[in-house]
Image: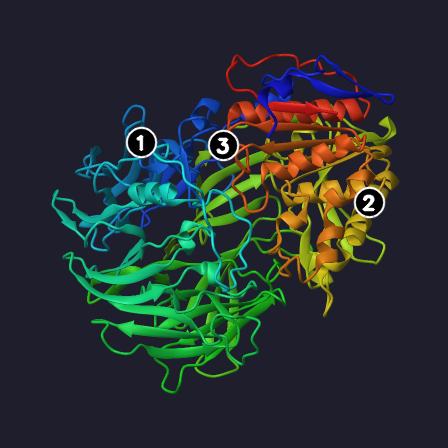
Amino acid sequence: MFHPTFARYALIACSTLLIFTPPLFSSEYQLPSKPLQDVVKQTKKVSTRLSDNGQWLAILTPKTHPSIEHLARKELKLAGLRLSPKQLIPSRVKFSYLNIELVNLKQVNLSKTGSDNSELSQAPIHIELPQGVELTNVQFSPDSRYLSFIGLSDTGADLYLYEIETKLTRVINPKRLNATLGLNYRWLNSSKGVITNLASKAPNIKTKSTSITPNISETLGKKAPRRTYQDLLKNPSDEARFSALTTSQLTLISLDGNTTNIGKPGINISYHLSPDDNYLLVKRIAPPFSHMVKYYDFAQSVEIFHTSGKKLSTLALLESSEYRPPGSDSVRKGPRMIHWRSDKPSTLAFAKALDKGDSRVKASHRDQLLQLDAPFNLAPKPLVNTPWRISQVKWGEQNRALITERHSDKKQMRVSFLNTEASSEPQLALWYQKAIRDTYKDPGKLYRTQAYNKGKPLGRVFHMENNTLLHYGLGASPQGYQPFLKSLTLKNTDEQPADYLSNTLWRSSDKQLETVRYVVDLQPLTLVLNRQSNDTPSHLVLLDVESGKEKVLYRNPQSLNAFKGMSRQLVKYKREDGVPLSGVLYLPSNYKKENGPLPVLMWAYPREYKNAEVASQVNYSENQYTQISPKGPVPFVANGFAVFDRVAMPIIGEGKDKPNDSFRTQLVNNAQAAIDTLVTMGVADRDRVAIGGHSYGAFMVANLLAHSDLFAAGIARSGAYNRSLTPFGFQHEKRNYWEAPSLYQQISPFTHADKIDEPLLLMHGEMDSNSGTYLMQSARLFKAIRGLGGQARLTTFPYESHSYKAKESILHMLWEQESWLKQHLQQPKLTGGSERSNNKALTPQTSLH
């Protein structure tokens, strides 16, 4: 990180003389031109929740970008967490809401398709919320009588309950929540209460150690090949703070106000209720704490409690994941994915590695799925062995399970049915197998419903009736998205091979892009759809499939006038070796080919594949509405640029070849093909093309500038540029530095900084918590370019992490990009970039050479 005073000066190269001059740009927060400001100000898309009985739809208005003062509030960084010690909550909440409206779907009068659907027959219910409180984790109770949410205030977190019938809201926790390990709570399936973590006592947190001591780490010959993490524990003082902040009392709070403590206070990392509400599965952390991994990889005890509060047994003691063997499919020893069967009252299920968790070991079977019935004192019952690593288990009706296996080296996954009550030994019956990134074969989501036992509700399961289930998805295809709802009938799943009969129940209109958000009812088939077109933002529609009658439930506002008339098209082309590629091209309003070529901003993110066919797949619909994100490249269409977004950058390694062994060559070939295509179309001026990307995309940008002369300038945000600083792998590269030292060197743009002879704009959050992307990565690359006489600009954002959040930071980021593109693609000077923010205290730090 640069000293703050350094930002007041710019180091300028003038011939061979280096001199200090006044800065070309102010170091205070700047505002971009008005169209780009409007992109930041626009309303975010709403979120929704559907009650279990299908009657109530909750529409949640998300909070917009926080202020930089909000991010600058005191926080502690411990074990991969960022915490507010005063509030006992995460200091950075990902999703929060300002408003909730309830729509009663049972009282919506449907009308014929195409008729006036502008107004609901009954106005939504607006929930009165406490002043100065942000909402998060909004849920319906299982019986659909209540809407619950966590409210965040300056004093901490509380659990609120809104009763739909009486329209009354109340706090139900007797003392504030301890949400340091997550803003979580769980409803009893009976809807008679909730389980959550309460503050056990006011933690005594010392921000500074009372004594100064050396920080000592020691290794005892046991391999621990972990990624490069940040915000880890470093010393005994950190351990004491972590323990004091995260220790909580797990508590059952009944709706009548009574509370029951579940065991003694502890560091409760997770907790899950059995479907019959009798038992709790609790994972707890205990010392010694690791200084190498984040909190969720610490050693854990897995314990079972009765909801009366009594501890019944310790199911497992799990060692720290710092000793997990290397490899994507390697796992921690012992039982994992421990969970309740949602279709049974009190049966646990879990996976266990048959290869000691080491995916490098040759084995005919990797995993075993087992189950354990209450009272949990007998040996677990094996259900099935799997050739690949189990990554997910879903439970359905009729004793069915859906098991997902992964083989990361092959980039493959497969999904199989399991009948746990088969007359013979249960066998996996394959439903589908596909490349992990193969979207054409993705069947989407399963329709789920509530399971019952003797009339009492259990958990949610995928619906099975007459051996038939429902699934819905985007329907990606070479022709674009074709969203669907289908039924799948299992004719025989007790032995291999299984036979299936698929039937399409609903498909999206060709003139609009419609996707299923919820299946509300089966008789008659009623759906809540997201509907959009290329000129209409996504809106919510209630549809009766059989009659075709519908009603618009909510419309997103459309306010970005500067982008009206902007054109968009999918461009398909091929690279030198014949691999099909594509990208989405945006052109300014009223642009015509005879106007001549435009300056172009390309934006991309490399992805690794084992299959060229999958790498060439198209994920696009001409009916999509362009939702313009301030963090993407599309806003710059308002500046008169052509924008080529989502430019395919596949890195393919078929057979025994590793994708990254030819990373640089494939990267340049991808970019060359994209530029050649745009020039041939008459859209691009070959000498005025810039390349941009974030994170691994930034790594791509620096490599392209170092190993080609295709681009006039680059924009690289929050990247990692020296792979020797991420020695135990990066992205999907699993070889460590000592196994492939030449690869790490050749793939690192820092190694080739002397070849970066185009201007590069580097940006980075000063508190980046992402694995491997330390602020040092950008700072060191900038210093290398400066020392070698290249041209670069480095801007760092105070209090920002890997993805920038504060409104001031995002506006300034846009201004930096706008200024850089105008300067280096030879466009007229800005007219709207000279305005200043009123904030004088917190400023981005900028270095220029």
> Where is 566 relative to 668, above or below?
above
Q: Which image quadrant: the C terminus?
A: top right
x, y percentage for residue 514?
Answer: 54, 46
**Could you classify mark 3 by the number of other residues whose Cα lies within 10 Å: few (under 14), some (14-19), or many (20 or more)?**
some
Q: Amino acid at mark 1?
A: Lys
Query: Residue at label 1?
Result: 86
**Could you classify mark 1 by the number of other residues whose Cα lies within 10 Å: few (under 14), some (14-19), or many (20 or more)?**
some
Residue at horizontal 85 percent and vertical 26 percent from the top: 595
Q: Amino acid at mark 2?
A: His
**Callout 3 touching callout 2 (CB < 8 Å):** no
In the visual, does 208 lie left or right of 266?
A: right
Q: Amino acid at mark 3?
A: Lys
Mark positioned earlier in the residue sequence (2 or 1): 1
Alpha-carbon distance for marks 1 and 3?
A: 29 Å
Q: Secondary structure at mark 2?
A: helix
Mark positioned earlier in the residue sequence (3 or 2): 3
> Where is 248 relative to 469, above or below?
above
In the visual, does 241 lie left or right of 528?
A: left
Q: Nearer the viewer, residue 518 or 337?
A: 337
Query: Residue at label 2?
Result: 707
**Callout 2 touching callout 1 (CB < 8 Å):** no
Q: Secondary structure at mark 3?
A: loop
Query: Residue at label 3?
Result: 44
Residue at horizontal 69 percent and vertical 30 percent from the top: 566
> Where is 828 relative to 42, above or below?
above
Residue at horizontal 34 percent and vertical 63 percent from the top: 339
Mark positioned earlier in the residue sequence (1 or 3): 3
Q: Secondary structure at mark 1?
A: loop
